[in-house]
Image (tube, grey):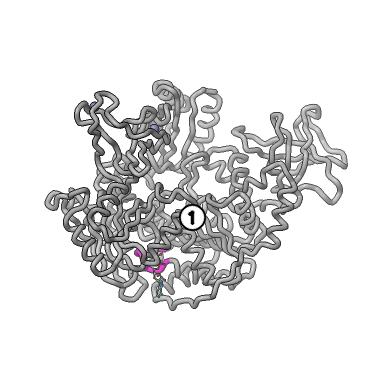
Amino acid sequence: MSTSTDSTHCFLEVVLDTPLNSSFDYRWSCRPGEEPLPGQLALVPFARREIMALIVAVKDRTDVAPEKLKDALAVRSQLSPLPERWIALARFAADYYQRPLGEVALPGLPKNLRVPRTVALDRALKKLAKLDLQQDATAVDMPVLNPAQQEAADAIGGAEGFTPLLLWGVTGSGKTEVYLQACARVLARDPQAQILIMVPEINLTPQLEGNIRARFPGMMLATLHSSLSEGERMLHWLAAHNGQARIVLGTRLAILASLPNLQLIVIDEEHDPSYKQQEGLRYSARDLAVWRAHQLGIPIVLGSATPSLESWHHARSGRYRRLDLRERAVRDAVLPKVRLVDMERDRARDGLTSEVLAALRGRLERGEQSLLFLNRRGYAPVISCDACGWISNCTRCTAFMVLHKPEHRLRCHHCSLELRIPRSCPTCGNVDLQPLGRGTQRVEEHLHALFPEARILRIDADSTRLKGSAQAAFDSVHRGEVDILIGTQMVAKGHDFKKLTLVGILNPDTALFSQDYRASERLFAQLMQVAGRAGRGGAPSEVLVQTRYAQHPLYGAVMRHDYERFAGQLLEERKEAGLPPFMYQALLRAEAKELPIAIEFLEAARDCLPSDAILINDPIPMTMTRVHNVDRAQLLVESSSRPALQAYLRVWVEQLRAMKSRVKWSLEVDPLDI
Ligand code: ADP
Ligand code: ZN
Ligand code: ZN
């Protein structure tokens, strides 16, 4: 049965933000000359609600019977339609990550566009006309590039068509300057050109934003990241969508921005795991960016001192063109000297070896800055009772409650359970409970006791909870108001601290023996990044790594700053072990009140679609099995062929949906943590 139009009606095929993997047709009475277009938003009735939908097609017939057909309520005609190529991007992401199109496309839009009020949009649009995203800044001159930078900037700025470029540059080699000068060429060539620049962390946007504004005064820059208010996000999104913003700077979510004249994509610190969204649509913004560049036939630059093995592999096989910056850009700035402090010989007191203490003292005397890196926040990861062996387990998770001393709390970092610190042991009443191990708060406390005169600042997720506080903290480091900085990976990335001459790495060993096959790739990148904060101003600098495994080859590679050989070895190992990037993976996760229920579902999933092209593993409990009273298990499927895996997943997901299990499950394609 089908329904066709008379002259005054048409049918809108729309997608909605629901788990249902299909599109829906609605009737719409069009006034002549005001026909809706694909890519516009429409308000439709759905399940007794009115919700915003994305029009994917406008048709003159439908298969829906007339009595079942509902009328769309409104079409947002003030907004120019999302470009066809944007819908194609969302469709690719939806297909690749096995999600319904509507669940990808609609959440990709600012919330204010999706509320069923039309007034809001008008007001916004008016604001945008007046808005000055241009914010004047005094122009600064472009520094003269060194030959390696010049070659890279020329290669990027002069690239035509789809050209993936891997900018491999040691920390402080001036990658930012290369991006900026390549951008200048692209912007000068075409007065409409738009550029998307992505950074892994929100905290890195202000530094780069400042650089961009100073370089391109009077040009409209939009920023997209999660700490914008909904109103701000809408304005910035619209500036990109209308083509007014010439540069869009953002974190991973910016990959779904509508950019009608996009001509260059820059992904800074491309190796960073933050480019992977870890919930909902678990996409890799880096991978989508490469697809988007391919779709548009434009160049894309992936920059890093320690590229992901995926990108390195592509560079080795010739799919990506490699551009090398092997030296630091600032004259006299050389890479820091890395030394290992053997903790078997130099026993640490309060987590600090005498060598690190002496180095800190020297910096304080000379008025230079130091950074201590410890990737563990809180005071101590656990407290325990010596008398009976009680430890502060979370009652809801397979995890410890972490001691947060300044806040007088025990906190679970996984389910956010909070308790007052018990005065005495809950099992035996012993009042002498001991903190075990140390986090940033505890090191900060020791430092205050050891160096009462020093200005000490801790930067981690706890100290920067308030909006703007992270920026204020980084600014005070830049202004030289801090002698010793102690922090987690928040301080390791990207920052250009000019007065820093010492980096102490306190407790990296735990990652050496992780079950996660990516742990050494990550640890290496992290150590190179944090080491790279030192010596950027030109003064001689050093990095001290406290370790019990001074012979470990990973540390040897860090000492030699030898990414190339280390990456080569890891790739060999991955190839032999049949791991990514030589294998393609997808992970099915299941959650249930009891572990056996989750496992049972995964066993059914394992058996429902046998295939010769796919390696289907057995279900296993996740390493951290219980979180917030829910047990979790996983099932890994693998193939040496991406298309084969994709074809399998498409059918498999339909079967899983058809099982109608009460178990909550989710599928992740190209998982980072398995
Ligand atoms: P990276 O991103 O590679 O770690 P940055 O882009 O932060 O390095 O550059 C490090 C420092 O070098 C910055 O202070 C930058 O201003 C400076 N710099 C970059 N290029 C040049 C150049 N050609 N001449 C002088 N200084 C430069
Ligand atoms: Zn006890
Ligand atoms: Zn918990």
Specify the segment rendered in magenta: 167-175
Say whether residue 406 is left or right of residue 17: left
> Is residue 238 rendered to the left or right of residue 264?
right
Q: Is residue 423 left or right of residue 414?
A: left
Sort mark 1 into few (<14), some (14-19) or many (20+) by Cα contacts within 10 Å: few
Vertical order, 291 against 190 (above or below): above
Q: Is residue 317 left or right of residue 162?
A: left
Q: Nearer the viewer, residue 8 or 555?
A: 555
* Residue plotted at (41% across, 37% down): 638
Residue 623 figure quarter: top left
Q: Three-letter amino acid code at disc 1?
A: Gly
Residue plotted at (52% across, 32% down): 653
The answer to if 476 sits in the magenta stretch is no
- Which residue is located at x 21 percent, y 57 percent? 356
Image quarter of residue 410: top left
Q: Quadrant of ligand 3?
A: top left
For the N terminus, the quadrant is top right
Quadrant hosting residue 527: bottom left
Front residue (pair 14, 298): 14
Quadrant of image for the C terminus: top left
Query: Circle 1 — which element?
Result: loop
In magenta segment, residue 170: yes
**How many numbered discs?**
1
**Can you give x and y, in whole percent of width and height, for residue 642 in the image?**
46, 43
Q: Which residue is mark 1?
A: 468
Question: In the rendered view, would you say 648 is above or below 274?
Answer: above
Is the residue marked 1 within 8 Å of ligand 1, measured from its CB? no
Question: Picture coordinates of residue 543 (x, y %)?
Answer: 25, 61
